[in-house]
Image (cartoon, rainbow, N blue to C red):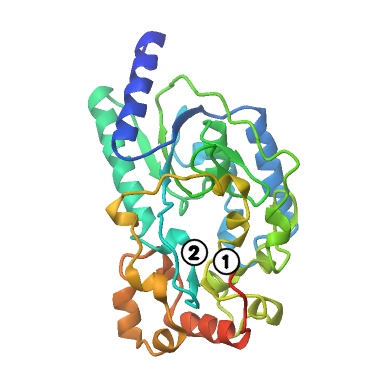
Amino acid sequence: MTAGSATALAAQLRERARALGFDPVGIAAVPGGERMQLRTAALERWLRAGHQAGMGWMADPRRRAVESLLPGVRSLLAVGLNHHVAAARAPGALKVARYGWGRDYHRVIEGRLRQLGRWLEQEVEGVRWRACVDSAPLMDKAWAEEAGLGWIGKHGNLIHRRRGSWLLLGHLLTTLELPPDAPAQSLCGSCSRCIPACPTGAIREPFVVDSRRCIAYHTIENRDPQLPEPIGAALHGWVAGCDLCQEACPWNHQPLESSLEADLQPRPWWLNLQAGEALGWSDAEWDSRMRASALRRIRPWMWRRNIRAALAGQPQADP
């Protein structure tokens, strides 16, 4: 493929990604530049410190070797899906992280990336590709940063100038060599509002999140019968994930476009989740309500554990 045809194909790929609802989009060259080496070294330090808690899959060696996911990979298309919805919880309702309000984003993003992959197959004979969401062992935020989608903030989330940090990420790996976009530059500056916003001190220092102290980790991944006392006492009503560090970020306080994606609209009961009713759900009702939800990782007994812990920590002021 000539340089001119590669440039034209990259432009078409970006255009098709935007037509599928992704914005921002960008392309990174594999193996990436010096920043990817620094991000890989940071991941290794994070793992050595035990910040992954019980998430053993974070140590999967493929996460630090993108070529192991697709032999011969030369480029990567990174995409963001805006999941900010102009909706608010009812006063006193239990709290669920925004990414879980709608349909399981893994299915939404992967399905659209596969459409892009099939289109590539039609355009270039013999091309190989792989669609990845955050369930794949890929440094997704680092590659999104490398592709110019945004920068990794001090709370560990990717931030975009117009979208803030309310972005769901996906990546399409390909054996095609496509011209890359410039990596994003950090615009956090001296701001550190996200750090004190965490009631459990999970952000140990800028860019370092200790999962052992993180409300999101404990309400979704922790399989222990009881939450640690310091976590349970600081839930502030959060029973499935936590958005406090993102809510504190100034980039999320600007006027933000509300997503009109039908798949991302909140199920009404998420916005008015009452403890008494939710504790009474049978396992079958839980299964029905959580169908096609990214929050199915929370088992029914964990769901009840989290709610009881949140109730035990009341009264809590709404942040």
Q: Mark 1 points at which residue?
A: 216
Q: Quadrant of residue 5?
A: top left
Q: Can residue 284 be seen in this view?
A: yes
Q: Can residue 50 be seen in this view?
A: no
Q: Position of residue 286 (x, y in %)?
A: 35, 80
Above or below, 161 against 313 in this view is: above
* Amino acid type at image mark 1: Ala
Tell me residue 8's x, y (percent): 34, 15
* Residue shown at the point (38%, 42%) measured from the top left: 131
The front one of 254 and 206 is 254
Residue ID at (26%, 35%): 118
Q: Do the residues labelled 2 and 1 touch (CB within 8 Å)?
A: yes
Q: Nearer the viewer, residue 244 or 201?
A: 244
Q: Is disc 2 placed on a helix, strand or loop?
A: loop
- The residue at which mark 2 appears reads as 97
Which amino acid does the dot numbered 2 rest on?
Ala
Location of residue 109 with respect to 38 vertically, above or below: below
On the rendered structure, is 126 left or right of 234?
left
Q: In this view, does 133 lie to the left or right of 242?
A: left
Disc 1: CA contacts within 10 A as few (<14), some (14-19) or many (>=20) = many
Tell me the quadrant of the picture where the N terminus can be found.
Answer: top left
